[in-house]
Amino acid sequence: MKKIEVIIRPEVFGAVRDGLAQQGIAGLSVSEIAGCGRQLGRTGLFRGNTYEIEFLPKLKLEMIVDDSKVDGIVEILLREAATGKVGDGKIFIYPVEQAIRIRTKEVGSIAVE
């Protein structure tokens, strides 16, 4: 099993979610986060005053999937989350040693389906 962690722009979430649903991915955790990288930040204007927005809003998606689904998911993420601009995000893939569903005590891949 693998944990796929993705940081994306909030405006592409609908397309990403639809693509993952078509791939059969139903289990997904979504967190609102803020961050900066090469995109740095931007300057805003409010009532005539300029201010710096250092951290931009992003979404972090997390899912645990069977190894066989990783390539298909990455393909969807690369297709649906890309705008071609700095700040499109990142994909991180980690090994998962074990998963246990608390309610049924199922262990392994079956626990994350």
Image (spheres, rainbow, N blue to C red):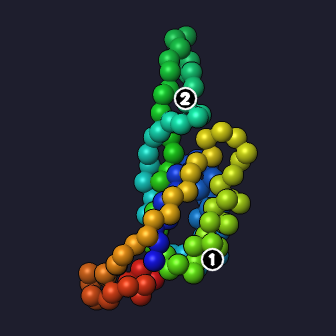
Classify the position of the N terminus by image quarter: bottom left
Q: Within 10 angstroms of label 1, few (less than 14), some, or many (20 or more) residues? A: few
Q: Residue at x 53, y 36 (%)?
A: 37
Q: Residue at x 48, y 28 (%)?
A: 54
Q: Amino acid at mark 1?
A: Gln
Q: Nearer the viewer, residue 45 or 36?
A: 36
Q: Amino acid at mark 2?
A: Gly
* 14 lies above or below 28: above
Distance Cα–Cα, label 1 vs label 2: 34 Å
Q: Position of residue 2 (x, y in %)?
A: 47, 72
For disc 1, the marked residue is: 23
Question: Picture quarter containing residue 43?
Answer: top right
Q: Position of residue 58 (x, y in %)?
A: 51, 45
Q: Residue at x 71, y 47 (%)?
A: 83
Numbered disc 2: secondary structure: loop
Numbered disc 1: secondary structure: loop
Question: Picture quarter containing residue 23?
Answer: bottom right
* 101 lies above or below 73: below
**Going by the image, does 107 lie left or right of 47?**
left
Q: Position of residue 93 (x, y in %)?
A: 50, 63
